[in-house]
Image (cartoon, rainbow, N blue to C red):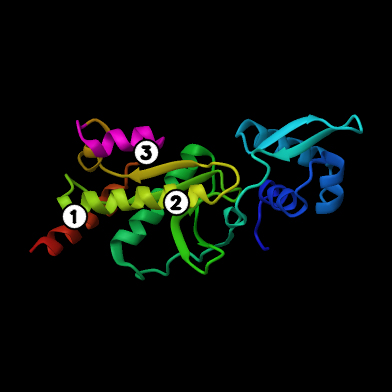
Amino acid sequence: MPNLTIAERIIQELLRTTLPLDDDELARRLEIQPRQTINQACRRLEQSRQVRRYIGPSGKIVNELVGGSLPAGTVVEHAVLPEPAAGDSATQRRAEGVMLSLLGERLGKTLRPRRFALPDGVRVEVDGADEDLTLLVEAWAHQGPPKAAQKHKVLADAMRLLFVASTLPVPPRMVLCLSDGEATRHFTTARSWAATALRTFDIRVEVVELPAELRSEIVAAQQRQYR
């Protein structure tokens, strides 16, 4: 399966064998060197409670899936998507691309659009993800307080993050990236169920400031839409 992370490949192999495997055996089966790479990935899986590590009959530490096995559908195919062409989705998409770039610089990640293909053929896209799928991001460049339908749009983005995160072997961080304080308030400091829900599900809201010229273009585009 293409584009799987090392952690995903480990989960897949443990699912396939249904037997506890030590780090050396995983490294041999997956043809990954150095062995320390497998050790580090397995330790992270243990920290996220995906894998249990204990001393096996041979005296080596083995890795076993928590609960015995996980649904096969938890391992999905994914692919990096090309960046939108200039003018492809007008000002909004261009601004969201800038936001992802700025957020990536802040967090030390390279964020690119990514499409996930589930075993049943369903496909879902997120605005940005890093190479190792440790971070999933949805971006929204709106300026000013959101209208009711726009609030629903942002919450749909949050649901997308939760859904994609649930298909990955190692839980990623989830971020809603916005670019305006007024647009953000309903989802952060307001006494709203939306803000409480985002905190409950550990979906962070990050605000990045757009360049003044691009911000003006967004405001102008919104004004045309509202006429």
Residue 35 placement: quadrant = top right
The circle on residue 97 is none
Residue 69's place in the image compared with 81, above or below, is above
Q: Which residue is mark 1?
A: 149
Query: Of the residues tagged 3 and 1, which is closer to the observer?
Result: 1
The residue at which mark 3 appears reads as 206
- Of the two numbered discs 3 and 1 on the same chain, state the one appearing first in sequence: 1
The amino acid pointed to by label 1 is: Ala
User: Please, what is the three-letter code of the amino acid marked with disc 3?
Assistant: Glu
Say which residue appears at 21% left-offset and 38% top-offset: 186
Q: In terms of secondary structure, where does tag 2 sit?
A: helix
Magenta-tinted stretch: 190-206
Q: Does residue 16 appear left or right of residue 227 in this picture? A: right
Q: Say what secondary structure mark 1 lies in.
A: helix
Q: Quadrant of the N terminus?
A: bottom right
Horizontal side, residue 224 vs residue 43: left or right: left
- Residue at image coords 87%, 32%: 60
Residue 42 location, x and y as percent? 72, 38
- Please tell me in which quadrant of the rendered image residue 25 appears: top right
| Residue closest to the eye, 128 or 62 | 62
Residue at the location (27% across, 54% down)? Answer: 153
| Residue of label 2 | 163
Could you say whether the residue bearing mark 3 is in a helix, strand or loop?
strand
Residue at the spot x=41%, y=35% of the render? 202
Does residue 181 appear in the picture of this structure? Answer: no
Q: Which of the two residues, 193 or 142, is positioned nearer the viewer here?
A: 193
